[in-house]
Structures are given as structure tokens and as C-alpha cells.
Image: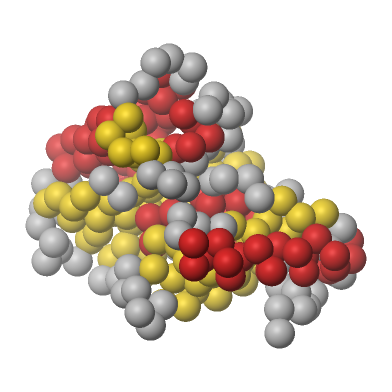
């Protein structure tokens, strides 16, 4: 059964990716232009496309997405969807964004897909299988020191998270081989899963940004620490890493 769920996630991610690729570089309708974020009509349209495909196959399942919820929220099956992770990149014609789709059963992530339509890369995973990149198994990095590591630090959309994220970024710039701030949490965590990055750290993130990536990293041999925020029940801090060395976060 999990295989059919994964196939649905893959089909939905590829369909959404094709839609986004076709609209990349075109004039876009902006729903909200915030201080550190942008909301596009395309976000809503892309999630609707994903929802339609999933609910056609599993009408009694729930959708929990960045652009809203749909379906039976009491279902034991919940699809966690980010239709465009990296909307600001997309809007500014930076080809670094992704579609992220995960499935939770009774709160446990059992399948996940992250699709980068611009590079034609698709990460996929089932709870009892290997992490795959375009069908080939991948593993987290084998580097064993922070001094040789490349670390991505995410900074969210509020002044508070920026103020907390910048000191962390500065510390990683000083201690790691290289530090990155790339603008797509799902690709950051997918890159950890396949060894391109050694760690991804962010102090305020939504579940839809990282749900698929959590399973990708864990099944690729890495470690993910996801901690709910005390004041913001829908937000989390996250450290996803290879687990091969101390990130020196304390």
C-alpha cells in the first residue's frame, strides 16, 4: 500500500513541477507582498492541482498544506504539501525551488517526495526503504568534521527569527568550510539526504517545508531533530544532519 501512496506523491509532484516549470519566468500575480516573503496566486493554483490528484485517488484522506487544508481532517492519513518551497526565488527567476509532498499515517511520516523541476531531480522515500534520487539510492555525507562541512542556515520571515538566525549563520561561517542560505528548506534538507550538504539548521519552520525531507534524511542514514515552538504550535526548530560530527551548536 505504501508503494501506491508513494506513486501518488510522485505523480502529484511531477505534475506540479511541470506546471511550475511552464510558468517560470512569466509575469506572475502577487497575492501578498510582505516584508520578507511573497505569496503568489500560483502557490494556490499549484496546491489545488496537487490536492485534486491526491483526493481523486484517496477521497477520504486529509490535506494539510501551506495554502490551506482540505479533505477529512479526522482521517488517519494526512498529506503534508508545500506547492512551491522557495516562492521568493521563483518570483525573482532564481531556479532554486521545489515541490514537497509527504504522507503521514496517525502522525508518522510514511512516504515523501521532493521535486526540483528546474534540475529534473526527484527525491523519494518510503518508511521501510532507501532514500532515492532519480531512482538511485543515496546516503548522507561521510565527512567527519565541521571544518570540512557545508552547512545551510535558514532564516525565516519575521524580525525575531532573523535576529536569532543571523548569529547562527555567523558562527557557521566562521567554523564550517562553507555556509549557505539558499531559500528553499525542502531542497536544503534533500541536499543533506544525498550528501551535498552536511547540515541544515533553521529556528522557525513549518511542517510542510520539511515533512518529506525528514524521512529522506533518516532513511539516508542521517539524523533530524525537530522541536515544536512553545509559543507557536505550528512552527518548529530543526537540525537535519549527517550525524557524523558535532555541529557545535551549544
Q: Is residue 150 left or right of residue 75?
A: right
Q: Position of residue 8 (x, y in %)?
A: 32, 41
Please name whichever residue, 246 or 175, is drawn nearer the observer in this view of the structure.
Answer: 175
Color encoding of the figure: secondary structure
Q: Is residue 214 visible?
A: no
Is residue 128 left or right of 192 when viewed as pictured? left
Position of residue 91 measured from the top left corner of the image (x, y, whole percent): 47, 29
Quadrant where the image shows the N terminus: bottom left
The residue that appears at 18% across and 52% down in the rendered structure is 69
Q: Quadrant of residue 127?
A: bottom left
**Picture quadrant where residue 236 is located:** bottom left
The quadrant of the image that shows the C terminus is bottom right
Residue 34 in the image: above or below residue 204: above
Image: 226 above or below 19: below
Q: Residue at x 73, y 59 (%)?
A: 151
Depth order, front residue of 56/243? 243
Question: Does the rendering let one see residue 248?
Answer: yes
73, 9: nearer the viewer: 73
Amino acid at each position: 500500500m505504501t508503494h501506491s501512496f508513494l506513486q501518488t506523491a510522485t505523480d502529484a509532484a511531477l505534475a506540479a513541477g511541470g506546471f511550475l516549470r511552464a510558468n517560470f519566468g512569466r509575469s506572475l500575480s502577487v497575492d501578498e507582498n510582505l516584508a520578507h516573503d511573497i505569496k503568489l496566486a500560483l502557490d494556490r493554483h499549484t496546491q489545488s492541482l496537487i490536492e485534486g490528484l491526491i483526493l481523486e485517488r484517496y477521497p477520504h484522506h486529509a490535506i494539510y498544506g501551506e495554502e490551506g487544508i482540505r479533505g477529512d481532517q479526522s482521517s488517519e492519513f494526512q498529506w503534508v504539501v508545500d506547492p512551491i518551497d522557495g516562492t521568493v526565488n521563483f518570483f525573482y527567476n532564481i531556479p532554486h525551488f521545489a515541490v514537497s509532498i509527504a504522507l503521514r499515517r496517525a502522525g508518522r511520516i510514511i512516504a515523501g517526495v521532493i521535486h526540483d523541476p528546474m534540475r529534473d531531480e526527484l527525491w523519494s522515500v518510503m518508511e521501510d526503504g532507501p532514500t532515492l534520487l532519480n531512482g538511485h539510492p543515496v546516503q548522507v555525507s561521510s565527512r567527519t568534521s565541521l571544518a570540512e562541512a557545508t552547512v545551510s542556515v535558514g532564516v525565516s520571515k519575521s524580525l525575531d527569527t532573523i535576529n536569532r538566525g543571523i548569529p547562527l549563520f555567523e558562527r557557521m561561517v566562521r567554523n564550517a568550510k562553507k555556509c549557505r542560505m539558499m531559500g528553499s528548506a525542502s531542497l536544503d534538507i534533500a541536499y543533506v539526504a544525498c550528501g551535498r550538504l552536511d547540515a541544515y539548521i533553521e529556528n522557525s519552520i513549518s511542517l510542510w517545508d520539511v515533512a518529506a525531507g525528514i524521512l529522506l534524511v533518516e532513511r539516508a542514514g542521517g539524523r533530524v531533530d525537530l522541536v515544536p515552538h512553545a509559543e507557536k504550535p505550528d512552527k518548529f526548530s530543526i537540525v537535519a544532519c549527517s550525524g557524523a560530527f558535532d555541529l557545535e551548536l551549544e
